[in-house]
């Protein structure tokens, strides 16, 4: 009776065909384990914008020092930028910054005399041998937060880098004042038309 026409309200229609019985899909008796996708071994070198290089003055857009200008000293292996204020000029210490949260400016500083070879991602890694966790009473007894303790090695490295960097900054007129000035936008500013 396949192909017979049925006359209904909307006109003649073909009768529905019966579904053909298909053989069942084969499934193995035991589960076959497939390796899960892992990104651990897939470490590609991060792609950095062409405008960001050693010696370029960048504007920090996020974090504690947002709105401040800093000098990019080098790009680390992790893809983060090593920047410094210098600390004496605007208070930005040696720190790592994600390049997504910076604006690269057209201003450059000669940082060839600044030695940052020993500063890498391991230098900034937090120590894993933290003291044993405080007891519950000690935890709730704390009222004021502790000030961050900066190691003597970090202070010495900051002074060494700042000495060379400040010398390079002072060699360019008005650059020290430029680095000390905060970056701000007002209602009438059009950042998409600005040339940094």
Image (tube, rainbow, N blue to C red):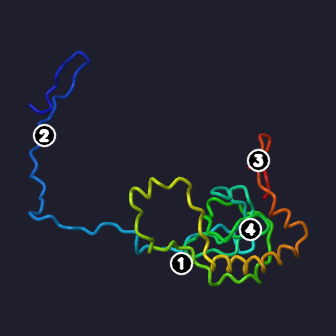
Between the C-alphas of marks 3 and 2, the distance is 68 Å
Q: Are marks 3 and 1 in contact (CB under 8 Å)?
A: no
Q: Residue furthest right?
A: 173
Between the C-alphas of marks 4 and 1, the distance is 21 Å
Q: What element carries label 1?
A: helix
Q: Is mark 2 on a helix, strand or loop?
A: loop
The residue where tag 1 is placed is 122
Q: Do the residues labelled 2 and 4 touch (CB within 8 Å)?
A: no
Q: How many labels does the image show?
A: 4
Q: On the image, which quarter does residue 68 sit in? A: bottom right
Residue depth check, mark 3 versus mark 4: number of the one nearer the observer:
4
N-terminal label among 2 and 1: 2
Position of residue 110 measured from the top left corner of the image (x, y, whole percent): 80, 77
Q: Residue 185 got which mark?
A: 3
Position of residue 29 measured from the top left corner of the image (x, y, whole percent): 8, 63
The residue where tag 2 is placed is 19
Between the C-alphas of marks 2 and 1, the distance is 66 Å
Quadrant, the N terminus: top left
Tell me which residue sits at (40%, 65%) in the image: 133
Residue depth check, mark 2 versus mark 4: number of the one nearer the observer:
4
Quadrant, the C terminus: bottom right
The residue where tag 4 is placed is 85
Q: On the image, which quarter does residue 101 sit in? A: bottom right
């Amino acid at each position: 009776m396949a192909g017979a026409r049925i006359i209904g309200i909307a006109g003649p229609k073909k009768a529905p065909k019966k579904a053909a019985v298909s053989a069942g899909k084969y499934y193995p008796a035991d589960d076959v384990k497939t390796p899960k996708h892992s990104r651990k071994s897939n470490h590609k070198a991060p792609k950095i914008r062409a405008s960001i290089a050693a010696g370029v003055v960048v504007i920090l857009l996020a974090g504690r020092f947002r709105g401040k200008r800093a000098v990019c000293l080098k790009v680390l292996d992790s893809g983060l930028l090593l920047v410094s204020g210098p600390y004496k000029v605007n208070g930005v210490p040696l720190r790592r910054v994600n390049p997504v949260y910076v604006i690269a400016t057209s201003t450059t500083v000669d940082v060839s005399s600044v030695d940052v070879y020993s500063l890498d991602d391991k230098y900034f890694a937090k120590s894993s041998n933290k003291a044993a966790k405080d007891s519950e009473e000690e935890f709730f007894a704390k009222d004021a937060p502790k000030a961050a303790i900066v190691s003597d090695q970090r202070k010495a490295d900051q002074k060494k880098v700042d000495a060379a960097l400040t010398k390079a900054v002072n060699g360019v007129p008005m650059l020290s004042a430029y680095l000390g000035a905060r970056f701000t936008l007002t209602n009438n500013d059009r950042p998409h038309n600005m040339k940094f």
